[in-house]
Image (cartoon, rainbow, N blue to C red):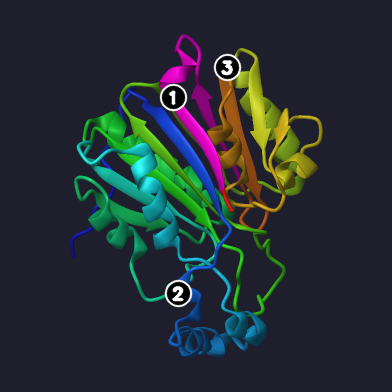
Amino acid sequence: MFTAGPPSASDRPARLVAAHARVFAETSPTALDPALRPFLADLVRPYGNALREDLLTEGVGHSFGEMAEAMLPTVVGPDEPVDLLVLAFAMHDLRLGRATACYLSDQCPGAPMAFAVCDQGSGAAFTALRLTESYLGSGACERALVVVVEQSALHYEPGEPAPIPDRHTGVVLRLERTGSPVAVGQHTGVDAQRVTQLLRHDVARLGRQATVVASARLAEAAPGVADVVADAGQPYTGIWCELADGGYEGVVLVADYEPSLGLLCTSTVDFSGNDHSAVDSAAVAVA
């Protein structure tokens, strides 16, 4: 059996070049695909979850592939080949049965190697960044995209309470070997009592003032630490939307906590010494 993983990391950090966020107000045509109901029925039958017939009848939701495909031209031009694309999500895609990361590779300049990170809740985006950091740091690739997506329609009753986004949102981060340095840290096995201490420790380790951007869930678990709190209605993309809004100077620490997995994640972006205009940041709402 052949197995592969990321190449060994070096001391050369990944660097953020562009960040773009978009809210998709419309419904994807995929939501009315007649194959969606039987596919979902087969998916949930072993677990006894009831389908949300109201959502299926109404035809709500959005395809991650359609969302990401619309955002790609905002961060890379047709003559800027990408070497790596990593898709991160928590809730499943509306278009089931398709390897969306592979589909996006075909739509992206350079037809990059592509894969997805999921089943980690809000930690998926940080894992995607950490893997991307390894590839870029080793010299295995020159340009990478991390795509974080969420859509607001869960077409079956969850087995246990879980955050459902209020809107369809996507964020694309473009990383290269020149730009604003990015670093990722992840703590595992973290219970609620240790969150504040660990987060404060991570901030203190930076050795300088940092702007802390946290999810609403983390801000509640670690009160008084966050400078910016992301919209609770965007549980998986909110902190990355805040980063894409731009306007930050110095060091920014983006953080989230996934209590179901005991996963506390942080990522720093160091704008110090850089002309912030070099990082193309934009957040767009589509009516």
N-term mark: 2 or 3: 2
Q: Please name whichever residue, 75 or 198, is drawn nearer the observer in this view of the structure.
A: 75
Q: Quadrant of residue 142?
A: top left
User: Residue 116, how many percent across, how many down?
Assistant: 38, 57
Q: Residue at x 48, y 89 (%)?
A: 42
How far is mark 3 from mark 1, CA to CA? Answer: 11 Å
The furthest residue to the front: 287
Dot 2 falls on a residue whose secondary structure is helix
User: Residue 167, how many percent across, how many down?
Assistant: 63, 58
Dot 3 falls on a residue whose secondary structure is loop
Q: Please name whichever residue, 94 or 131, is drawn nearer the observer in this view of the structure.
A: 94
Residue type, label 1: Val
* Magenta run includes residue 171: no
How far is mark 2 from mark 3, CA to CA? Answer: 40 Å
Q: Residues within 10 Å of mark 3 (few under 14, many from 20)?
A: some
Q: Is residue 93 left or right of residue 141?
A: right
Q: Which residue is mark 2?
A: 30
Q: Which residue is mark 3?
A: 249
Judge whether 268 appears above or below 6 on screen. above
Judge whether 42 appears above or below 26 on screen. below
Q: Residues within 10 Å of mark 2 (few under 14, many from 20)?
A: some
Dot 1 falls on a residue whose secondary structure is loop
Range of residues picked out in magenta: 264-285
N-term mark: 3 or 1: 3
Locate the N terminus and report the quarter of the image it occupies: bottom left
User: Residue 177, how many percent across, how many down?
Assistant: 30, 25
Q: Residues within 10 Å of mark 1 (few under 14, many from 20)?
A: many
How far is mark 2 from mark 1, CA to CA? Answer: 34 Å
Q: Which residue is mark 1?
A: 279
